[in-house]
Image (cartoon, rainbow, N blue to C red):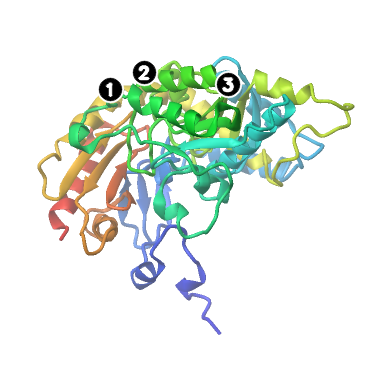
Amino acid sequence: MRQINDISSFWLPFTPNRAFNAEPRLLTRAEGMYFYDETGRKLLDACAGLWCCNAGHGRKPIADAIAKAAHELDFAPTFQFSHPGALALSQRIAALAPEGLDHVFFVNSGSEAADTALKVARAYFQKIGQGSRFRVIGREKGYHGSTIAGIAMGGIGNNRKHFGPLIPGTDDHLPLPYDAATMRFTRGEPQNLEKYADALEGLVALHGAETIAAVIVEPFAGSGGVYGASKSYFQRLRALCDKYGFLLIFDEVITGFGRMGHAFAAERYGVTPDILNFAKGVSNGAAPMGGSIVSNKIYDAFMAGSGGTHNIELFHGHTYSAHPLACAAAMATLDIYRDEGLFEHALKMEKVLEDAVHSLKGTRLVADIRNAGFAAGIEIESDPKAPGRRGLDAIKLAFHEQDMVIRVGGDTIALSPPLIASESDIAKIIDGVRGVLERLT
C-alpha cells in the first residue's frame, strides 16, 4: 500500500512526472507578485500563475466574495434553472465584449470553451440549413485546450500525435504568421502578414467553401511560444470569413482581461469575431470559470429554431457551468480590474516589458525573442539530442536559484507577469531569466 505522502499519487498534467517526483517544487501560499514555498521562501511569479492571476495573488475582495457565495448559495443547477450571479456576470461580460456579442455560454475552462465553440459553430449551420459546413480550421501552434476538440483544432504536434484519430473536419490548419528567417527578434507584433491569412483561400479551393464552418485563432499563440500577429492580419481573416460565410472564432483564453491592454484583444485589433472564448483571467484564477460569447446572429438562429418553446435549443452544458462561487469570484475580479485600471496599466507597461526582454538578445543560447501585448517569449536553442531538456532545466534553475516561477513550452520561456507588475518587478524577472540562461548547459 502506498504511503499517504507518496507524491506519485498525483499525476501532474503537462509535466515530466518522474523528474518532478524526484525533485518536487511545491507552492504553499501566494500574495501579490509572489508565490511562497513550504520554507517560506518568496518566489517571483513571472507567469501570473498560468496566464490567469492577472490581478496578482491573494486578493481579499475575491476571497471574500467566494466565501460569501459559499455561505449563501453553494451550488445552483443551470440546467432548467439559474441564479442572480450568473445573470449579472453574463451582462457584465457582454458589456465588455465587442458590440454585437451579447450572449454568454458559461463553462469551467478554456478547453470547455473551445469544445463549446466547435459545437455551436456546427450546430448553427445545421440550424440555418447549411449542414454541409462542418470543418473548423485552426492554425499551426494554436492552443485551444486539452480536450479532444481542443487538440484537434489546435496545432501543437505533441498535443495531437499521441491520441490517434481526432475529430473529422479539424485536420486543416493555417500557417503560423511567422518566418524565422525574417522575424527573429521582432519587437511587438510583426507586420505585413496578410499572406498568411490568404492561405485560407487554398483550403477553400481544396475542400469547397460549402464544407467550412469556422476559423479559430488566438490573438497571439500563447502556449505555442508567444507569436503575435498584426491588426491587418486579423482584419484580412475577418474579410475572408465574411466572403465565404465562415464564422470567425477568437480564442481569448489567454489574451482576455487585460493581457493585450484591453478587455479583449478583439478591441485592440478592431475586429469583431462571431464567437469569443474566455477563461483564466475572468476569475483571476481563483475559481474555474470560462465561456463563449456568441453573436446575436448565432443566438437568434438557435432561438428561432423550429418547434415549440419547450424544445431545448442547444444540447450542451456542464454541471458546474456558471457555478455560484466562480461567478462571485469573477464579479469581484472585474471590480478590481476596473477600480485599479489594470487594463490601462498593462497597456502602459507593454513597452517596459518589450525593452527589458529584448535586452536579453545576445545572451548565450537565446535563439529568438518575441513579444505581444504584456507577454513575451524567449526561445532557447534546443539540445538536438534532447529537445525540451533545456526548458525543464530553466524551470528548475528559476525555482531553485533565481527564486522565480516561470512558464515554459518546449524550449521557450513564456513571460506573462500579473498586470499589477511594476518596472522593478519586470527588471527582477529579466535579471532572473538572464541568470537562468547563463547557467543552462
User: Tag 2, which secondary structure?
Assistant: helix
Q: Position of residue 221 (x, y in %)?
A: 38, 37
Residue tagged by mark 3?
A: 245
Residue tagged by mark 1?
A: 191
- Residue 289 seen: no
Q: Position of residue 239 (x, y in %)?
A: 47, 17
Q: Which amino acid does the dot numbered 3 rest on?
A: Gly
- Viewport quadrant of the N terminus: bottom right
Rendered position, 179 above or below 408 = above
How far, Cα to Cα, is label 1 from label 3?
26 Å
Which numbered tag is attached to residue 285? none
- Do callouts 2 and 1 mark residues in contact (Cβ within 8 Å)? yes
User: Tag 3, which secondary structure?
Assistant: loop
Mark 1 nearby-residue class (10 Å; few <14, some 14–19, many ≥20): some
Which numbered tag is attached to residue 232? 2
Q: Position of residue 437 (x, y in %)?
A: 17, 51
Question: In the image shown, does 373 or 399 lie closer to the viewer?
Answer: 373
How far, Cα to Cα, is label 2 from label 1?
8 Å
- Viewport quadrant of the C terminus: bottom left
**Residue 185 sits in which quadrant?**
top left
Q: Earlier in the sequence, mark 2 or mark 1?
A: 1
Rendered position, 261 above or below 320 = above
